[in-house]
Image (cartoon, rainbow, N blue to C red):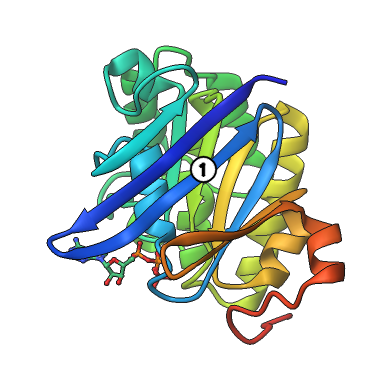
């Protein structure tokens, strides 16, 4: 099976501190992988390396057959949504889609339109007037309409209330099934990951502690990263 992400002895050091070390794993194409770990475990560092926002200090990482962030074609293969992915308050929903279209060679305008309708967003609404959940869904729409090969989600629901969190995760589950996407999705909460992921990677203190089928791992290990927050 081809891998959309291959990490080999991957490490990242900030000054003297290793935020990530000796991480070796694959994300096979079509998998929805959950990345969990306590605060400071290295999740954001790992996903930023995968998105080309950081460069490794040690080892290698390959995404969709190339170096993350190497060029525009490589950037176009990856959709990235983080908790703090900016939406622009004064720009409308339609403006965000236009911006996405301009930056993305494989932009799927039909998909973007269909999602905006299904989510009940108005095209002429300014992003600043959307709820946190709607802004996250707009950011996800832009990422999905890029038609990425790999979707990276860095705690996209961390700041949302339980209802918005659940709506986002249900939408994400449907969207990944429809598009047969490969996804790496980080969360503090195992309960979020259980909802949408088939594979689990547990990072603890900068290293991959466990990796495997999400249900098998949760049945055989006590994976606790934060209190469960089931709505
Ligand atoms: P959280 O769940 O709190 O977001 P995380 O698992 O995403 O944590 P990272 O943000 O990757 O973890 O941080 C890993 C370690 O690296 C932490 O100790 C953090 O303080 C440190 N770190 C992260 N970014 C920097 C930076 N730019 N400079 C120095 N240290 C950093």
For the C terminus, give its image quadrant.
Answer: bottom right
In the rendered image, residue 218, in percent from the top left (x then y), is placed at 80, 68
Task: Check mark 1 vs ligand 1: CB closer than 8 Å? yes or no.
Answer: no
Tell me the quarter of the picture where residue 74 sits.
Answer: top left
Residue linked to disc 1: 24
In the rendered image, residue 104, in percent from the top left (x then y), is placed at 38, 19
Between residue 111 and residue 191, name the one nearer to us. Answer: 191
For the N terminus, give its image quadrant.
Answer: top right
Does dot 1 land on a helix, a strand or a loop? strand
In the rendered image, residue 18, in percent from the top left (x then y), is placed at 28, 61
Between residue 228 and residue 179, name the one nearer to us. Answer: 228
Residue 155 visible in the current orientation: no
Between residue 106 and residue 71, name the one nearer to us. Answer: 71
Vertical placement of 69 versus 115: above or below?
Answer: above
Vertical placement of 81 versus 178: above or below?
Answer: below
Tell me the quarter of the picture where residue 117 sits.
Answer: top right
Q: Quadrant of ligand 1?
A: bottom left
Tell me the quarter of the picture where residue 53 sits.
Answer: top left
Q: In the image, what residue occupies the spot 71% across and 37% down?
A: 31
Describe residue 189's horizontal placement relative to residue 214 as left or right.
left
Vertical placement of 52 versus 19: above or below?
Answer: above
Q: How packed is label 1: few (under 14 Cα within 10 Å), some, or many (20 or more)?
A: some
In the rendered image, residue 61, in percent from the top left (x then y), is placed at 40, 33
Q: In the image, what residue occupies the spot 31% across and 35% down?
A: 52
Describe residue 200's horizontal placement relative to residue 85 as left or right.
right
Residue 195 visible in the current orientation: yes
Q: In this view, which residue lies farthest toward the bottom?
A: 227
Q: In the image, what residue occupies the spot 43% across and 70% down?
A: 205
Q: In the image, what residue occupies the spot 43% across and 27% down?
A: 62
Vertical placement of 143 versus 109: above or below?
Answer: below
């Amino acid at each position: 099976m081809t891998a959309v992400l291959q990490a080999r002895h991957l490490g990242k050091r900030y000054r003297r501190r290793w935020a990530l070390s000796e991480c070796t794993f694959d994300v096979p194409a079509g998998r929805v992988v959950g990345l969990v770990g306590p605060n400071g475990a290295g999740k954001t560092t790992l996903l930023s390396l995968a998105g080309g926002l950081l460069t490794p200090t040690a080892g290698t990482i390959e995404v969709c057959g190339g170096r993350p962030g190497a060029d525009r074609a490589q950037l176009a293969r990856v959709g990235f949504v983080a908790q703090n992915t900016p939406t622009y308050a004064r720009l409308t929903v339609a403006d965000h889609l236009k911006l996405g279209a301009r930056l993305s060679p494989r932009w799927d305008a039909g998909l973007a339109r269909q999602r905006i309708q299904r989510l009940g967003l108005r095209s002429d609404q300014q992003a600043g007037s959307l709820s946190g959940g709607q802004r996250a869904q707009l950011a996800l729409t832009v990422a999905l309409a890029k038609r990425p090969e790999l979707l990276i989600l860095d705690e996209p629901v961390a700041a949302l209330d339980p209802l918005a969190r659940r709506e986002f995760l249900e939408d994400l589950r449907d969207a990944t099934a429809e598009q047969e996407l490969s996804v790496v999705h980080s969360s503090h909460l195992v309960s979020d990951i259980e909802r949408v992921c088939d594979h689990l990677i547990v990072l603890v203190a900068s290293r991959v502690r466990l990796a495997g089928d999400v249900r098998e791992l949760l049945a055989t290990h006590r994976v606790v990263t934060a209190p469960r927050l089931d709505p």
